[in-house]
Amino acid sequence: MSDTITVAEIHAWADELEEIRALIGDQFARTEPRNNAIGYLQGLLSDEERKNSWTLSERAGQGTPDGMQRLLSTTDWSPDAVRDVLIGYVDQHLGDPEGILAIDETGFLKKGTASAGVARQYSGTAGRVENCQIGVFLTYATRHGRTFLDRELYLPKAWMDDPVRCKRAGVPAERVMATKPELAAQMIERALDTGLQAAWATGDAVYGKHAGLRHRLHARGMHYVLAVPKNQMVITPSPGTLGVEGRADELVAALDARAWRTRTAGAGTKGDRHYAWARIRINGPTQNGEHWLLARRSLADLTDLAYFICYTPKYVTLITLALVAGARWAIEETFQTSKGETGLDHYQVRQYTGWYRHITLSMLAHAFLSAIRAKKGAQIQVPGLW
């Protein structure tokens, strides 16, 4: 958004917050927690350097953080119900039949062992193994904007094998062990069940190599471009046989140089991101679409390659596949803006419920900003897809 805010824009912000108040108001039985929720959202949208219960309480004119802390702990409201409201709000303001669902995770660095799900585990945020919580997120990218739809806290096996520890952290007894791809599949299916407009799904190799996730997407009629590791085994058609199985990198290495085409993966901070792309038909034909192995190669370093398994409509173009693959970076931008603008990682709660409540309100604040930007006409330019 521009640095200069007009009076009309201030009024538009106020009107938009009234819309959110109306949307989530029914989730709170009493006036006090309802007002605290709106105050919390206003604080997350503020210019406070740290956005936690103490600073947001002060900004709301409250003498103590008790009200905001209760909002995240003992007040009777469902973050999942607010999540459902969020999905409808995003679809109303940013919805597009060609929308892309992007799956990824982010780490929240933590000290100690008490915070729900905390463990020594790899954090892409830090780029190394750290003591952290991992949140798996579903985002939505369209020509109108990018924002969150859903979230799940990943609980490592060490947690799920320790019911006493889970109980202390407030993990519900009905929560079962689920891998990150399984959490992603659950979130995608929930979003689609609401009627959300979407045509594609994308994610990195953690998710793409999971056959169960790919099968669930296929069953829902969702097309996808999912990254896979170089040793991913795929089957290429062969006349008169059941097909030939091979590694992704070996199949791509055998391609003729003429198979490669330079295409953009979408706009980056320094203009269009151009790569060389090639594809190979795999898995045989299906009634409603096609399967491809897609490869992306750096123009500057011929050894820098990435691989994707795709399920697409018939006659899909290479530029469309490149753009969907490139849209995965939208979630990284969403993580950055939400941590900088709406305090996604500013929480101080340890309990399972508190994590979901803060994260959901931060996601709603981010969706609010995305809706405001969409109303200002800040369209995302993605040639060939939107």
Image (cartoon, grey):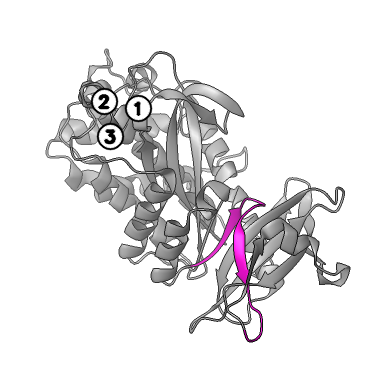
> What's the residue type where badge 3 is placed?
Ala
Q: CA distance from mark 1 to mark 3?
A: 34 Å
Residue found at the far bottom of this picture: 240
Give me the residue at 17% from left, 47% from top: 26
Q: Nearer the viewer, residue 379 or 78?
A: 78
Q: CA distance from mark 3 to mark 2?
A: 33 Å
Give me the residue at 28% from left, 24% from top: 351
Q: Position of residue 48 (x, y in %)?
A: 48, 23
Q: Nearer the viewer, residue 250 or 204?
A: 250
Image quadrant where one finds the C terminus: bottom right
Q: Residues within 10 Å of mark 2 (few under 14, many from 20)?
A: few
- Residue tagged by mark 3? 37
Q: Secondary structure at mark 2?
A: loop
> What's the residue type where badge 2 is placed?
Asp
Give me the residue at 21% from left, 22% from top: 164
Q: Is residue 157 above or below residue 366?
A: above
- Work out whether mark 1 precedes mark 3 in sequence or the reverse, and give the earlier one: 3
- Callout 1–callout 2 Cβ contact below 8 Å: yes
Q: Read off the magenta span.
A: 223-240
- Residue tagged by mark 2? 162
Q: Nearer the viewer, mark 3 or mark 2?
A: 2
Q: Secondary structure at mark 3?
A: helix
Residue 158's tag is 1
